[in-house]
Image (cartoon, helix red, strand yellow):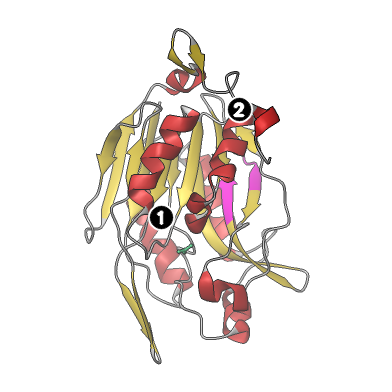
Amino acid sequence: MKVGFMQFSPLFGRKEENVERVINSLRGAKADLLVLPELFSTGYLFLNEEELRRSAEPISDGLTVSKFLELAKKENTNLVFGIAERADNKLFNSSVLVTAKGECFVYRKLHLFDREKRLFSPGDKELEVFDIGEAKVGMMICFDWIFPEVARSLALKGADIICHPSNLILPHCQDAMVTRCLENRVFAITSNRTGTEKRRKEEFTFTGRSQIVDPKGRVLAQANAEEEKLCIIEIDPLLAKDKKVTPNNHIFEDRRTDFYLW
Ligand code: ACM
């Protein structure tokens, strides 16, 4: 199975350009699963809720989702990407999976990072796992990495691959994801963005280093901190079915849930 990420620096507020740029890069990519960064079509540093609301889109007929549904069908691929979602009167930081079969599934970021709490509603949907044929995939977004319960829940629900659209600012996630993969025996594709956004007095630089990690904690591929990169590699998703660390240790069955708080 061929999986990958696209790392780049979106232009703030220029949705059509960002979407077209990615579509042009992904045409002919010949991958089974590709992951894009968090909020890839809008950029990150919204000044206020009104500005975010103008950029956010409904899942049913928003520009990004519609174009990516078309692309996934045409290229016979599955795509995961972060968008600003408008649903009724609420705004969510969401990750969308569109499949080659024309299906569309949504995850809404559960753990909002810092200033995101002023802009978005926290996720209100269950963590789910979706069957794309060759593997089962789950989604989490950026700062969700610091809550090990998220990756654990997805793994317990059967995820082989965790798709992880990101706009990382802190330096720890790439290393932590090695542990998330090791402790759950899953693959993870962290698709991070690069570049700096400066708006009024705020400035964020994103850390790049998008990566693909396997169930043994090996980093199979990693971009550097600044480059634009479409990276596609071959993996065997069946490796994630083996939950044994030693012949006598099963990562799930050995858990002592009677001694934990959750
Ligand atoms: C983040 O969750 N975008 C840091």
The residue type indicated by label 2 comes to: Gly
Residue 256 sits above or below residue 172 on the image: above
Secondary structure beneath disc 2?
Answer: loop
Outermost residue, front direction? 259
The picture places residue 54, in percent across and down from the top left corner, at 61, 80
Report crowding for label 2: few under 14, some 14 to 19, many 20 or more residues within 10 A (C-alpha): many
Residue 14 sits above or below residue 83 on the image: below
Residue 117 sits above or below residue 37 on the image: below
Name the one closer to the observer, 170 or 35.
Answer: 170
The residue type indicated by label 1 comes to: Ile
Residue designated by label 2: 158
Outermost residue, bottom direction? 200
Whether residue 35 sits left or right of residue 54 in the image: it is left
102 magenta-colored: yes
Name the one closer to the observer, 47 or 122.
Answer: 122
In what quadrant of the picture does the N terminus appear?
top left
The magenta-colored residue range is 95-105
Q: Residue 90 carries which label?
A: none
Residue 188 sits above or below residue 198 on the image: above
Secondary structure beneath disc 1?
Answer: helix
Residue designated by label 1: 23
The picture places residue 63, in percent across and down from the top left corner, at 57, 64
Name the one closer to the observer, 107 or 118.
Answer: 118
Whether residue 111 sits left or right of residue 191 in the image: it is right
